[in-house]
Amino acid sequence: MDHPNVEIVERAWQAVAEADIETLEALWPPDIVWHVTTDNPWTGDHVGRAAVLDYLADVGDAGEAYEARIEDILASDDRVLIVSRVTARRGDRKIDTQQCMLARIEDDMIVEVWTLPLDPAAFAGFWRASSTLKAG
């Protein structure tokens, strides 16, 4: 049986993919914080549900093709580590890399997330220098 926090993260992942705001409101507190740690147009902290949703929508819209698939999930009572594979394309730029996301869980809600690409230089290079990207 999966740890309860794995189920929370999997539900949130699916809700993001389906733009299921009702589920995200049940899983993210109003003051959720999402830390983007790599040099890209969205680097920094996104605070609040609306800011996090805007950030995720911007990333999805910025590429001609963007997919993030869960490869592994490790859970404890307070944290969940997600290892995902990110593939994306923008013009002649392509990326296929892994990213870790660390989520802090409190009271059955994801209260804080850190994104940590395993190849930060490739990730930053993929997003760099595009006038079509907007920072969050």
Image: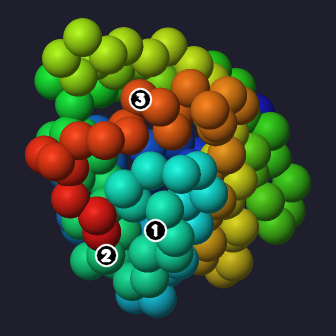
Mark closer to the observer (2, 1): 2
Residue denoted by label 2: 51
The image position of residue 65, as x and y in percent, is 22, 21
Please name the amino acid that badge 2 sits on. Ala
**Numbered mark located on residue 41 in the image:** none
The answer to whether one can see residue 110 in this image is: no
Pointer 1: residues within 10 angstroms few (<14), some, or many (20+)?
many
Q: Look at 29% across and 26% down and name the residue there.
A: 66
**Mark positioned earlier in the residue sequence (2 or 1):** 1
Q: Quadrant of the N terminus?
A: top right
Pointer 2: residues within 10 angstroms few (<14), some, or many (20+)?
some
Where disc 3 sits, the SS reads helix
The image shows residue 107, relative to residue 85, as above or below, that is below
- Report the residue that reaches farthest toward the right: 76
Please name the amino acid that badge 3 sits on. Phe
Residue denoted by label 1: 27
Q: Verify CB contact (< 8 Å) between mark 2 and mark 1.
A: no
36 vs 50, left or right, is right
Please name the amino acid that badge 1 sits on. Leu
